[in-house]
Amino acid sequence: MLTSMSAPTPLGTVTLITGVAEFLSERTVSRALAAVSAADPDADVTPVTASQLGVGELAGLTSPSLFAAVRAVVVRDLQDLPDTAHDELVAYAADPAQDVALVLVHAGGPKGKRLLDRLRAAAVHEVKSEPPKPWELDRFVTGEVRHHRGTIAPDAAEFLVAAVGHDLRALAAAADQLVSDFAPECITTEIVRRYYDGRAEVKSFDIADAAVDGSVALALEQLRWALHNGVPAVFVISAFASKLRELGRLHAAPRGLRGTDLAREVGVTPYRLNALSGQLRHWQPAGLARAIHAVAGADLDVKGGVGDSDHALERMVLTVVRSRSRESADA
């Protein structure tokens, strides 16, 4: 996951950004350049790709300029830097110019690993932009909100992830918008739902939750609302499949795991784990198998165009509800 920049300014520093999360990498670059601009609005900014750098060219880019006292150089695709330029870059990293900000962006992966090791040995400032795991996304949202000087309740962060999905750019934009509209008020689930309740993904998961909880009337009511408002059938089926897979993984998880370790094993956030644990108490393996089979059948019917898709979804909902343990079902 992204490690925030701790240096007050990238001037006089080599900032090494590594990882596959392009959005996080580019945002770190933007923040570095903003810090340079804050230090000197007239700073000279030069973006280059590493493959363009031959022997001696880095020295020219980082040397004093006739037109600006401060310089920023952004080198992207560091993994493609020619071998002949490695020694020069490592030597510069060991003794960077105080009026220059050198930002290096490596796209992740094994290519250029030896160069990265040499740069780390030269004590560059590294920022890792690895995407958060699914169970870490609520912490990502919380961090985004905090960055904008807002606060968000844990269940609201979880709901925002369910509503928006796993795209980091979309989550960051949503967090920014919510803080802009509601700070200094703490962002609650009610606030997030006000913005996103009509999204197909949210309604689909609401239907799945109601069915898994055994609330047949609510599940069918939500389903009919979704169908009337054009929510695609595949969204509903996907939500049911996801929910039942989570319950299955939780049931199969090794005994003795607790908290974060169990959440990681199941692939959900710790907050979500609490809700799943409560739901799983009302399910037995045979019931889960029946419900999963019903979802798979509905998926085949809908995608294969067999019969009425609305009827297939209703049949799926009813089967899932009835697959709950009978002694605990409330429908």
Image: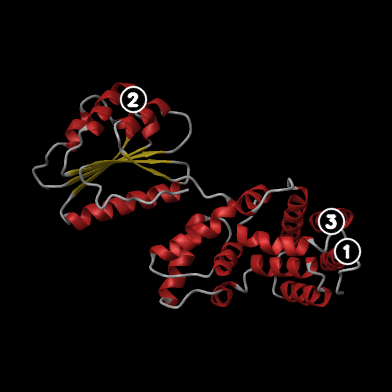
Given residues 106 and 215, the one toward you in this image is 215
Please give the residue where the numbered disc 2 appears in the rendered image: 82
3D distance between C-alphas at marks 1 and 3: 10 Å
For marks 3 and 2, the one nearer the N-term is 2
| 112 horizontally vs 156: left or right | left
Seen as rendered, the residue at the extreme right is 326
**Relative to 81, residue 14 above or below:** below
3D distance between C-alphas at marks 1 and 2: 63 Å
Decide: marks 1, 2 in contact (CB < 8 A)? no
Mark in front: 3 vs 2: 3
Please give the residue where the numbered disc 1 appears in the rendered image: 325
Q: In terms of secondary structure, where does tag 1 sit?
A: loop
Label 3 crowding class (10 Å Cα cut-off): few <14, some 14-19, many 20+? many
Q: Which amino acid does the dot numbered 1 rest on?
A: Ser
Residue drawn 55% across the image and 54% down it: 136
Please give the residue where the numbered disc 3 appears in the rendered image: 288
| 246 horizontally vs 287: left or right | left
Specify the quadrant that holds the C terminus: bottom right
Residue drawn 58% across the image and 72% down it: 196
Q: Which amino acid does the dot numbered 3 rest on?
A: Leu
Mark in front: 1 vs 3: 1
